[in-house]
Image (spheres, grey):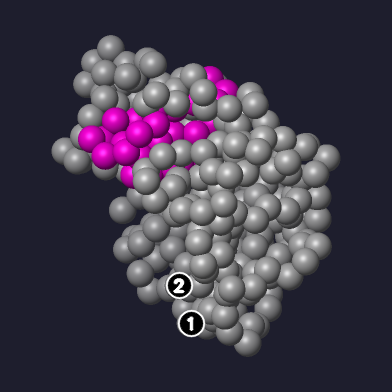
Amino acid sequence: SVVPWGAATYGGEAPNTPNTELRAVRSIHATDSAFAALRADGTVIAWGDATGGGDAQSVQSDLHGVTELYACKYAFAAVTCQGFGIVCWGSAISTGNVKCTLELPVRHIASTSSAFAALDAAGTVRCWGDQSCGGEMATEATEVAEIFGNEKNGSVVTWGGHYLDLELNGSSKTLDQLSSGIVCVSATCLAFAALKRDASVVTWGHRNRGGDSTQVSHLLVNVQQLCSTDNAFAAVTQKGQVVTWGVKDSGGDSSSMEIFLQSDVHRVFSTCNAFMAVKYDGSIVTWGGRRSGGDASAVAKQLQVAVAGFR
């Protein structure tokens, strides 16, 4: 079952209309102002702000047999038809309502704030959405194993956002670090963080939005997971410690919950401006923007919640 909290307009209250029961939910995904739940039967329930993807009525008839869900800042993308179909809904600023059938199945979809990129089984990347946010590539990318990485050595290729000076030409050291060994990449609105095979982290992009991790670099060792909000990152280390950096009000400062985040954290999840850590004992820890889910005290009785000052 699902327990939402936060601003009701942005998905803080569960939907109560017919056929929207949040049961047998397999995964939940979020835009800035809406949620979408993928149920075990392959159907999708969306709620929250309609302009942020909270209203999927226009494509509801196509949302069956869904195998994966993805989200950007304002829209959702669902993989259907055993990977051969993509259905999008949400704000037209990002993607509009997009429906397409592919010749090869989708392996993965990644997103920026207002664009999606799909990686198919042949290693080809297809982009759509706002061109300035990566919705169009100048050259075709092939033989890609993961989006941002190629099949041979795990190097990183970037596109979009040139007006934000996000191209990898500012630091030769960063370029060298990204030339091989990349396992996965996480993104805020204006910065990236790459996890390497040696469990180290490389960051680049807007200095104040997560692109500069020098203040916590000594803690970013043996990293197992990266997660991001719009303007901050959180890393989980091998011993279960959480390390954060970026904009304070977006989850970049977890000092108020530090006592709960020193060890035994299993995974971290995020909304646009808040993080939630799930610990091995089943309890959760939240921090960041209160209206974005950073304060779970209202549902503490339904969840095992760590709250600043008491547990």
Residue type beneath disc 1: Gln
In the image, is residue 42 above or below residue 55?
below
Residue type beneath disc 2: Thr
Q: Say if the magenta span includes residue 24.
A: no
Frontmost residue, 265 versus 21: 265
Q: Where residue 279 appears, x then y in whole percent?
A: 24, 37
Q: Say if the magenta span includes residue 232.
A: yes
**In the picture, residue 239 is in which quadrant?**
top left
Mark found first going from the N terminus, 1 or 2: 2
Q: Which residue is mark 2?
A: 67
**Residue under the image location 39 percent in, 58 percent down:** 27
Q: Are marks 1 and 2 in contact (CB under 8 Å)?
A: yes
Secondary element type, mark 1: helix
Q: Where residue 190 appears, x then y in whole percent?
A: 67, 37
In the image, is residue 163 above or below residue 101?
above
Q: Is residue 273 something that shows in the picture? A: no
Q: Is residue 217 something that shows in the picture? A: yes
**Residue under the image location 48 percent in, 82 percent down:** 82
Secondary element type, mark 2: loop
Q: Which residue is mark 1?
A: 82
In the image, is residue 69 above or below residue 247?
below
> Most extreme residue toward the bottom, as rendered?
103
Quadrant (top left, top right, bottom left, bottom right) of the C terminus: top left
Q: Where residue 260 appears, x then y in whole percent?
A: 26, 24
Q: Residues within 10 Å of mark 2 (few under 14, many from 20)?
A: some
Q: Is 224 left, or right, of 193 in this rendering?
A: left
Frontmost residue, 32 versus 47: 32
Q: Where residue 247 appears, x then y in whole percent?
A: 57, 23
**Part of the protein shown in magenta:** 220-248
